[in-house]
Each structure stands twice: as C-alpha cells, then as structure tokens.
Image (tube, rainbow, N blue to C red):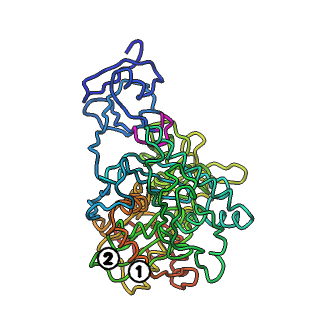
Amino acid sequence: MAGGFKVSFFEENKDIVVQSGTTISDAAKAAGVKIELPCAGKGRCGRCAVHVSDSKDGTPARALACTTKVEKDIFVKIPTGDGAVVASNDYRKVKIGKISSVVKAKDPNYGVAIDIGTTTIAVSVTEMNNGLDLYSAAGENKQRLRGEDVLARIQYAEEGGTRELRQLVVDSINDLIDVCLDRRCSPDSMNAVYVSGNTTMIHLFLGIDPSPIRIEPYEPVVKKAEISGFESGLRVNPNARVICMPSVSSYVGGDVTSDIVSSGMDVSKNLSLLIDVGTNGEVALGDKEIMMVCSSSAGPAFEGGQTTSGMLARIGAIDSVKIINKKIEFTTIGSADPKGICGSGIIDLIAEMFRNGWIDKKGSFTSKAKTETDDGSTYLRIVGDVRISQDDINTIILTKAAIYSSTEALVRNMGITFDDLETIYIAGGFGNFIGLENAITIGLFPDVPRDKYAYIGNASLAGAKYALLSSSFRVRIDKVFDRMTYLDLGSNPLFFDEYSSAQFLPHTDVSRFPSLKQ
C-alpha cells in the first residue's frame, strides 16, 4: 500500500496505516486499540503477545506487540483474558481447596511467587483474597555473570562471592517486581512472598554460602527458611512473610518439591514420573505412598549456555527447526531476525539432522552436512552468524544423556519400567516448549505412548503461587518433603551404566526406542 502498511485489528473492527518499522503496539495506540505493556515496551514480560497473520483466516504467528515491527500488511488478533483463577495449569485444573492465604484481612493483599532458576527467574503477583492473577514476568538470573551453572557459583561463593551473588539475584527479582510496580501496585501491598528454586539458589537468595553442600555429608546448610520482607531486600512490604520452599538435599531443592505437589503426583494412586528440564535435570518418581528423587548436572546447554550460538528464549531466538529439501527452515520468537538459537530450536535441529542423515548416531557430521571449518572447529551454518559446531552437538548429547539416564536410574532402582507409569510430567518453563517427538528422537525422553506425557509448564512457580493461597497445599508440601527419598546418582552404578549407553542418538540400545525408524 502506498505510503505505508495496513494493520487490521479485525476483532475490534479497526484499521490503521502506518509507516514501515512502526511497532504493533504503536499501531494499536494510533488505532485506539488497547494493548497493555506491563514492562513499558521493553520486551521483558511477554504479556503483550498477539497473533499476527497475513489474512483474516491465515495461520497466526505469535509476536510481541512492543517489539515486532510492521513490514507488510498484517492482521492482528489480541488474546483476551478472563481474570483466570491462579489455581489452574496448562493441562488441567488444580484443586487447592478453599482459599486460605498466607496473610489475610488486608486490602489490597498481594502475594509474590518467585521461581529462582539457575538461568531464568520468574515472578508472579497474585491477589491473595480472591486468587486472581495480577501479573507475571520472567527474566535472566544476573548471577550468570559469575558462572553458568550451579557448581561455578558455589565455587565463586566459596571464594568470597556470596554477598555479590545474593545481590545479583535480589536485583534480578526486583527488576521483575518493578514491572508490576509500573502498574501502580504499591510495594506495601505485597504482604507475602513464596520462593521456589534449587538448593543453591535458595542459599544464595538467603545470603548463605552454599559451598558446604558439596562437602561430605552433602547436606544443605538450611532446608527450610522464613525471613521478613526487610531482611530479603525485595521491594515488598518490610513486614511481609518471605517463605522458601523446602529443599530435601544438596541437589534436589524446593523447585522439585513444588513441581511434585503442583503435578498432583503426591496424591495419586498410580506411579508417575516427573522430569524438570533445566540447568539441573531433576527427576521425581512416586505416588501417594512413596517418592524418590534425584538430580543430574545437565548443564545450561538447553538454556543458552555452552553452545556457540545458544541464547535464552528471547526475541530473535530460533525456536523451531525443520529440514525440508535439504534446506534448514526455522521460526524465531517474535518473528524477528535470527540472533541465536534457544533450547527448543536446538532439540529440533539435532533431531532433524539425525533424521536426514546429516549426523550419525554418535552425533558426528556426515558428508551430507554442508559443514565449514574455522580455527579448527567444524560447524554447520544455520543462517548468517548463527551456527552449530561439532563441539556443540557433543555437549547436547552429554546433556540429554544425563537427563535420560537419571530417569532410567530411578525407574530401574524402583524395580519397574516406563510402561508401568501412569503419567510422565514434563516441568520447567523451557520444558513446556520442547517438541515431544524430537525430544524422543534424540533420546532425551523415554519412548512410550505419547498420551502418557503431560506438559505442566513452570510448576515450580505454580507451586509457589498455590502455596500463597492454600493451607491444604502448604500441608501437602510439608508431607511430601518428609517422605522424599534422595537417590545419589554420584554413587549409583546403574546411573553410570545408563549414562555411557545414552551418549548416542537416540541410545546404544535402539530397542528402547521402538517407535523410531532405525
């Protein structure tokens, strides 16, 4: 169209012509269409996501209105919300019982749920008197400046960096809380905080040197903790209750406790498996009678670390990949120019290269892959400067092997097989975006009937939200904490046998993946 491009907000029956490079949010403002920008248009919170297509009935793509620029005529649909009750999840309704919040009889009465991941931090603010979501956001854990993984940060803390690491994580959380404050929510109205996270992250949040947890007897310095809002350093009411989800061991923390209760496996009659895919690969196996947990140091390869072009799931990250007619096709978050590749894209890429014979069972490039060499490193160019190297593939295979082997070790130690499980829950903010078929193709997840799988998103954050609201949920947390049995994979021969066998695509024993065409 001469003079600009047409943006059609068809459900609002409003059109606007804008110049090339105008953001969708600015186009909406000019058209008189309301799109909320909780993070002031900085692309941090993801709450301004809209559906964009080339025609009214075209296939929509998800995009952030605040950062996506108009470069052609488009149709935009703005998702509508209905003030959904917090007691819900992506796959089912979670029954938490009658609302009985941690702090009562205040108005307004907000609670802050926090999930401190090694790579990413998520925050959710909830109205505790009625159970309604107010706001949620996620961002990078600034502690990455001092180490990508847990062990690196423990070492940094041991060398005198505990105070700095605590300040970095508190700053990261406050940045996310500030976005909520931009919506005229007063810190004094935030009367309770529930914090979930792995054991090391909880220690550093509390300002406790975590280095003793890697020394015999490998026990956390603190398993349960509650401090005041003032002591926490968070931008909340100074008298707020700040409660940490309990950690059962050095490497199985409150995030796993939260995952288990959020999934409901702790009250099920049938055995279920839970896999939390993150920098630490935590796994739980159990039902209402027993609960066994373990952790493998998977590393940050799926979350932007240790790979040449790896990045977090941010604008411009390649998040899905297909190889069609010997050509790599991909999508990016926000439909932006590709800047790197995030975890879901990496899993897709490895699976697609394996299916198409570009890499062999060991993950080595074959003659079918059009590789290049630079400074002695062999790599495949995806697009522009975004690439994957042979070393990257080796790292990914070790990572997936660690996660799969921990699931196999738990199941075998229990004397059962994957076929005996009712459900396999996939938890974690990143886990929610993993393509199931591709994850099975590379041997990350077990090859079982697909209807056994349930994606539950960031169950660690969800559990913290439910704990703010429900006394019965808090009772369940205490009960499951008391009966969790920790399996130390470091001294478990089954794990090492499995780990060696899993360092192939999909596995040394291909009979374990019967649905794949060998």
Q: Residues within 10 Å of mark 1 (few under 14, many from 20)?
A: many
Judge whether residue 288 can be spotted in this image: yes
Callout 2: SS: loop
- Residue assigned mark 1: 411
Task: Give the amino acid type for the residue marked by disc 1 in the picture.
Answer: Val
Residue at x 48% of width, y 49% of height: 138
Looking at the rendering, in which quadrant would you find the N terminus?
Answer: top left
Magenta span: chief secondary structure: loop
Find the residue positioned furthest to the front.
105
Kindly check if marks 1 and 2 are in contact, taking CB atoms under 8 A apart as contact: yes
Q: Nearer the viewer, residue 293 or 55?
A: 293
Instruction: Give yes or no for residue 419 being in the magenta stretch.
Output: no
Point out the stretch of residues depicted in magenta: 39-48
Q: Is residue 237 above or below residue 403?
A: above
On the picture, is 270 further left or further right than 313?
left
Residue at x 41% of width, y 61% of height: 464
User: Toward which corner of the image does residue 435 lie, by quadrant?
Assistant: bottom left
Q: Is residue 433 above or below residue 41?
A: below
Task: Give the amino acid type for the residue marked by disc 2 in the picture.
Answer: Leu
Q: Answer with mark 1 or mark 2, whichever residue precedes in sequence.
A: 1
Find the residue positioned furthest to the right.
159
Q: Position of residue 52 (x, y in %)?
A: 35, 34
